[in-house]
Image: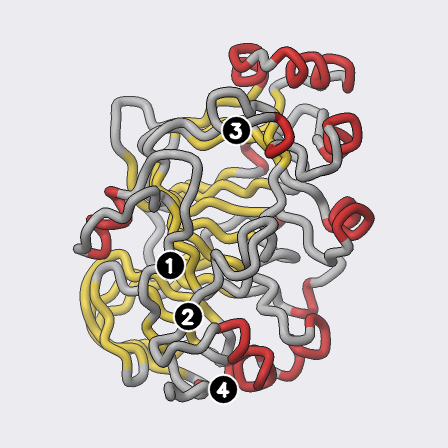
Amino acid sequence: MSSDNEPVALPANQPRQFYRGGPAIAALRDADVAENGPEDWVASITTQFGAEEAGLSRLPDGRLLRDAVTADPVAWLGPEHVAEFGADTALLVKLLDAGQRLPVHCHPSNDFAARHFGCRHGKTEAWVVIGTSGPEPTVYLGFREDVSPEVVAGWVSGQDSAAMLAALNPVRVSPGDAVFVPAGVPHAIGEGVFIVELQQPTDFSITLEWQGFLAGPEAGHLGLGYDRALACVERRAQAVDDLVRRTRALTGESVDLLVPGAAPFFRADRLHVSGTAALEPSFAVLVVLEGAGTIGPVALRRGSTVVVPHAAGEVVVTGDVVAVRCRPPRVSSLGS
């Protein structure tokens, strides 16, 4: 059985999805392409919506990470985190390779999720772009102008994809860009965009544009009916500059990737290690983008995904490594 006091390298965890993608994940990992594998759920204690086990990460010794955290939450998460969240990592990390444009959708807020799903977490998320392909890699983020509830409902009932997409802000992206997506903000990820995604640990998606993507409208409203589900849509215009951070040119041992508004939900930084670097104690998920080295006793290479328990303490990274480090919010940031 692996120790809950040391970093652990995780195998791939690619639950079946409705859309195409996956070659970029395979190339990063130097592995075969998984069938219907456009997402790799890393260090996940979250199941796909309505599933009993799909989506959960397993440790190399066969235990579900969820069960290991439940058995010893303080070792995995630290006492302050446990005091606020219990045996809940408060974080889900994914690799997501969009082999086609994803549908226009949004996610509920904490309040909406509490009222309708009995869950403390909504699904605010962020995308750290680590690769792109094609001539115009683009994401779509928030409405360009305020939209009335009647207009949104009309688009959904008529499945007017062109109108929905045209109403959103198109944002060209390249590696190093980081996009914050607050709960409720409608969005879509374009074909050829490869990201490390941080999100609150749920699988709640209200799919406005279901036709051509899902089996039917019932799969798009999570059992609420669209009359109720569309209440979670943020219909106000979004200022893209407040949500996007361009970090490609930034250097240093640790580069903060996200805009300040993300702090109550999660943290992400890009590590540039040449030699050695000591990381402060924290539950963390590392995705290695370049290079090779070690973290504690674990070997690192391009494509490695590693979960670090809080009990590992001030863990040391050695070698020449570029990695995205994902962490839950600081407990002191809650409510800010």
How far apart are the alpha carbons under marks 1 and 2? 8 Å
Q: Which quadrant of the rendered structure holds the C terminus?
A: bottom right
How far apart are the alpha carbons under marks 1 and 3? 24 Å
Could one spot residue 195 in this view of the protein? no
**Callout 3 amino acid:** Ala
Q: Which residue is mark 2?
A: 58
Name the front one of labels 3 and 4.
Answer: 3
Name the front one of labels 1 and 3.
Answer: 3
Dot 3 falls on a residue whose secondary structure is loop
**Callout 1 amino acid:** Asn
**Callout 2 amino acid:** Arg
Q: Is residue 39 above or below residue 73?
A: above
Image coloring type: secondary structure
Q: Position of residue 129 (x, y in %)?
A: 37, 43
**Callout 4 amino acid:** Ala
- First reached walking from the N terminus: tag 1 or tag 3: 1
192 and 245: which is toward the camera: 192
Q: Are marks 2 and 3 in contact (CB under 8 Å)?
A: no
Could one spot residue 242 in this view of the protein? yes
Q: Are marks 1 and 3 in contact (CB under 8 Å)?
A: no
Q: Is residue 314 above or below residue 65?
A: below
As drawn, is 111 to the left or to the right of 178? right
Q: Residue at x 60, y 34 (%)?
A: 219
- First reached walking from the N terminus: tag 4 or tag 2: 2
Q: Position of residue 303 (x, y in %)?
A: 25, 59
How far apart are the alpha carbons under marks 4 and 2? 19 Å
Q: Which residue is mark 1?
A: 13
The image quarter containing residue 67 is bottom right
Per the rendering, the mark at residue 311 is 4
Name the front one of labels 2 and 3.
Answer: 3
